[in-house]
Image: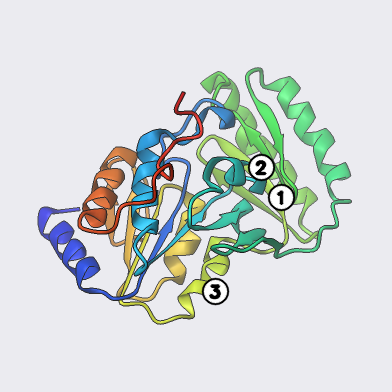
Amino acid sequence: MTGAERAALVAAYRAAAQRLLLLDYDGTLVHLAPTPGQARPDRGAIEVVARLAADRRNEVVVVSGRDRDTLTAWLGDLDVALVAEHGAWIRTRGGAWQPMLSRDGTWKDRVRPILDRYVHRTPGSSVEEKEFSFVWHFRRAEPAAWRLRAPELRHVLVNLTAHLDLQVVEGDHVVEVKAGSCHKGQAVGRWLDREWGFILAAGDDRTDEDMFAALPPQAHSIKVGTGPTRARHRLAGPDELRELLAELGEGGPHPAAGDGDSPDAN
């Protein structure tokens, strides 16, 4: 993002009476971590989101692949909407979690043994089970091993799920198999149906491209990190995005006392 592009984005934000901010979590608001549990939001992430959410002109939506229990524990006290498991669960601001898919999990009995076999064959990898998906994490595995096993596993899963209502999705050091056809682009549609004076969406991996594709032409889409993208802008990493979000929040109301406390501040 050039200086001129940033200035234009900030000016458009400040001029708008109604704003929508769609923010991915891992790799976008916080840095990617070796294991999922290590990516808890720090005080900086909590404070910048709380500041934006405190402005009544803003609707802030965290659009994540995380499970709903984790999002509730880490971000549930903020006045934001939450999207879990790439759209399988949605919690509107002030509302309760609502499933977007049938909760039939019988397919898991066919998939779990395959993933367990690849964990055994790829030391350092692990399986995370969510309500609507499995995720095979291989960030901590040896590169020589995962470069061989990840494409192999994806091929096995694609063949297995060809006639099932399942998707196989590759992310940053993950292979995920999930129920249904929901994705981030579909999930944010309920907010995009409204009229907004300003829309910003930020994400770092392939699943966020679905969200970018759903945006109207005038929206400000930001790819965080490297790699091909359909986003209009690019920032180097979460630190740069937080700086931009903090600039947007300048001049807005402060969150109530205590709202900026991080769950792991101690």
Mark on residue 190? 3
Colour setting? rainbow
For this rendering, which residue is in front, 27 or 123? 27
Residue to which mark 1 is pinned? 158
Q: Residue at x 80, y 59 (%)?
A: 164
Give the vertical position of 215 relative to 51 (above or below): below
Circles 1 and 2: CB distance less than 8 Å? yes
Question: SS at mark 1?
Answer: helix
Determine which quarter of the picture holds residue 45: top left
The reply to whether callout 1 and callout 3 are in contact (CB within 8 Å) is: no
Query: What residue sits 45% from the left and 33% below the top?
Result: 32
- The percent coordinates of residue 176 (x first, y second) are 65, 44
Q: Mark 1 packing: few (<14 Cα in 10 Å), some, or many (20+)?
A: some
- The type of residue carrying mark 2 is Arg
Q: Residues within 10 Å of mark 2 (few under 14, many from 20)?
A: some
Residue at the extreme front of the image, as rendered: 257
Q: Find residue 70 and name its label.
A: none
Estimate the spatial distance between the alpha carbons at disc 1 and disc 3, rounded to whole Å: 30 Å
Query: Where does the image place residue 126, in percent across and percent down from the top left?
Result: 67, 27
**181 displayed left or right of 225:** right
Q: Quadrant of residue 156?
A: top right
The amino acid on which the numbered mark 3 sits, given as a three-letter code, is: Arg
- The circle drawn on residue 154 is 2
